[in-house]
Structure formats: C-alpha cells, structure tokens
Image (cartoon, helix red, strand yellow):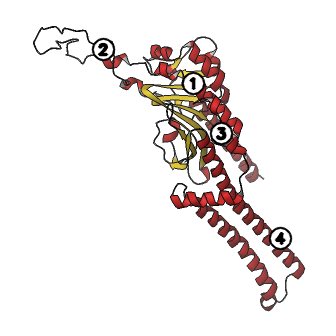
Amino acid sequence: MSTPGFDARPLTDPVDGATARAYRKQLLATGRAPKTAGWAAGCLVVGVVGVFGLVVVNLIFRLVFAPFFEGSAPNGVGSIAIILVVALIAAGLTALIVRAYRNGGVRWYRLDHFARANGMTWFPQASDPPLPGMIFSLGSSRTATDILRGEQPRMVEFGNYRYTTGSGKNRTTHRWGYVAIRLHTPLPHIVLDAEGNNTFLGTNLPQSFDRHQRLSLEGDFDRYFSLYCPQGYEQDALYLFTPDIMARFIDNAAQLDIEIVDDWMFLYGKRDFSTLDPRTWGWLFSVVGALMDKLAQWERWRDDRLAMPAAGTPASAPLSGEPGTALPFTPPVEALRPPPGVAPGGRRLKRAVPWATILIGGGILVVWIGLQSGVMNAIFSR
C-alpha cells in the first residue's frame, strides 16, 4: 500500500440523502450491516418520547383534574407553557436521534466507497476480533468498527476498537484506533512504547512490561520509543531494528505505540483511525507505506534456537539409507536454516505491575479518606 494511489474524494464528495438511505437499507437487507443500529435508534426515540410523554400527561392530568381532588387548580398558563417546553425538547431530541441515524448511512456510504477507491473492503463492525495484540484480549464488549481491509501487497487492516472494564459506576469504555499489518513469518514479541503520548503516570498502553526487558538502541531512538524485547533476544532486536528502520519509525510513527507479536505488527493510537477526515487517512497511509518496504528484511529473520538439536540427539546423522554413506550432493543452504517461528521464550514479553499508578492512586485514596475524616470530626465536635 502506498500513498501515490491515495484517493480521498469519496470522504468529502456530496452524498444525496435518498442515496444514503437506500444504501443503508441495502446493507441491512444483505446482512452486511448490523441491524442493532436501527433498533438502537428506535429504542432511543421510544425512550425519549415515553419519558417526556409521561411528564406531559402528568401536567395535563394535574391541570384538568386537580380541582376535583385538591380543591384548587394549578396555574393554567404556567402549566401550558411547561407542556409546550417539554414537547419542544422531546421533539428536538427525537429529531437529533433521527438525524444521527440517517447520517450513519452517509458515513457508511462514504467509508465503503473510500475503501473501494483505494483497493480495500469496508466492514461495519466485528465482535471480539481474533487478533493477538494486547488491546484485543482485555475487558468485555470488545468490538471493532468501521474496518477497512486491504489484501495487496499484504493484508493491512484499519479500524476503531472499543472494550469496557469495570461495572456499574466504575464501568469505563476504552477507545483505540489500530492498524494491523500481517507479516509472512512470526517474530519475537517486541513493543515500542512511544514516549510522546505517555503521561507522568507512565505508559499510555494498557499493559506494562518488566523493565529488565527494555533495550536501549543507538542514536536518538530512545528519545522517541522505549523498546521492550524478551530477555535473550537483544541481538535479534538489533537485527530487526537497523538504523534505517529506526529512522522510518521516528520520522513517520513517533506518536504511535507499536507491537510486534506472532506474525502481526500493530500500530495503536488512543483516537479513532477510521474517520471521514482525509488528513487522518493520508497520515495513516504514509506511515504504512513508509514501513511496508522494510518488512521483507524482517521476514528473513530466523530464530536460531529452533535449530538446536534435542538433548541426547546427535548434531548430525547420515542422510542416506546406508550407515556411514555420504550423500553425493550438498544440501541447499535454506535447508540448513531454522524453520520460520519463535522459540517459546521469545513469544511473549513478561508483564510488570504498574506500581507508579497503584501508589499514586493509593495516595489519593488516603488523602481523600483523611479529608473525609477531618470533615466528620469537625461536624461531630460542634
């Protein structure tokens, strides 16, 4: 994927409302779009009309029948004014919901046609996507939306992602944008934590990693990224992150967190990636295009640990049927290389407990309890 063929016109070209509505109906009829969107809008409209309707009915009842039960009627002019205000609010909210529902059809239409114009396929949503990246295994209600996927020259997927943690009042929805790039060979688990989007509490990522796995690279790379690789795979990481590749990441992806896991590379950001903004898409296409031609170098990597003979097995053995008889040819060099894959020790990084966040949170809780105790003491001491 490269930027010269980038066509953003479908994101901004005018779209007729009737065309968008017909397109939405077609998506729903063919099963390409979830029918829950229409149900959700309908439930919102019913809820708004129901709540405000009860208020209006209550006011009318009090206005008409209160004299028979309470002996005096409420102010007629004031009650009618309240009824009109409530009715206008209900009508306004209903109109906003209907408009948002219809605009959803326009959004789908634009993204679908943008995907086609750029050699990709659009999918409205996918529940619990089976991706190995760190954000895809957390929480509940895991959903990817507005997915754009290309297959050539390799599989690349852009999308927005949501998951929730906690429950009740502590329920939190986490929002991410992601780019998933399929590699042609598994690589060690490596994380590049972008320094530019971290806070005083530490990493922006939902997981922390053992600091003993952090590897310092040459030049200015450490100013932009903290690189984590499994212990024992430091030389492998240096092979993968040559100076030219480090320069590509610094120049194009310094605000993105990056994870290499199994045969995938993920780019993460705490914002929607799949939008109607041509500038966002131009930036994402340029990032992917800058990294794409370097991935072939990574895919030549092999894990030498997979070539080690098992304990008690000779390092070499006769390859012909007769014991001690040499083959009349030399095996090809490729046959002597380890197979694609990663030894168990390199497949996953070791996680760490985010002590800074825990200590700061605990300190805030202690201060809050102290303040509450002081207030209560002051009240009861009077």
Q: Of the residues under marks 2 and 4, which one precedes in the sequence?
A: 4
Which residue is the site of mark 2?
Answer: 336
248 vs 299, left or right, is right
Callout 3 environment at 10 Å: few (<14), some (14 to 19), or many (20+)?
Answer: some
| Image disc number at residue 160 | none
Callout 1 environment at 10 Å: few (<14), some (14 to 19), or many (20+)?
Answer: some
| Image disc number at residue 291 | 1
Give the percent coordinates (x, y) of residue 327: 18, 10
> What's the amino acid at mark 1?
Leu
Between marks 2 and 4 in the image, the one whose residue lies nearer the viewer: 2
Which residue is the site of mark 4?
Answer: 85
Q: Of the residues under marks 1 and 3, which one precedes in the sequence?
A: 3
* Secondary structure category for the residue under label 3: loop
**Identity of the residue drawn at 48% across and 44% down:** 129
**Identity of the residue drawn at 19% across and 8% down:** 328
User: Cα distance, mark 2 to mark 4?
Assistant: 81 Å
Which residue is the site of mark 3?
Answer: 271
Callouts 2 and 4 close, C-beta under 8 Å = no
* Secondary structure category for the residue under label 4: helix
> What's the amino acid at mark 3?
Arg
* Secondary structure category for the residue under label 2: helix
> What's the amino acid at mark 4?
Val
Depth check, front residue: 96 or 121? 121
Depth check, front residue: 94 or 80? 94
Q: Of the residues under marks 3 and 4, which one precedes in the sequence?
A: 4
User: Cα distance, mark 1 to mark 2?
Assistant: 30 Å
Callouts 3 and 4 close, C-beta under 8 Å = no
Give the percent coordinates (x, y) of residue 317: 18, 12
Callout 2 environment at 10 Å: few (<14), some (14 to 19), or many (20+)?
Answer: few
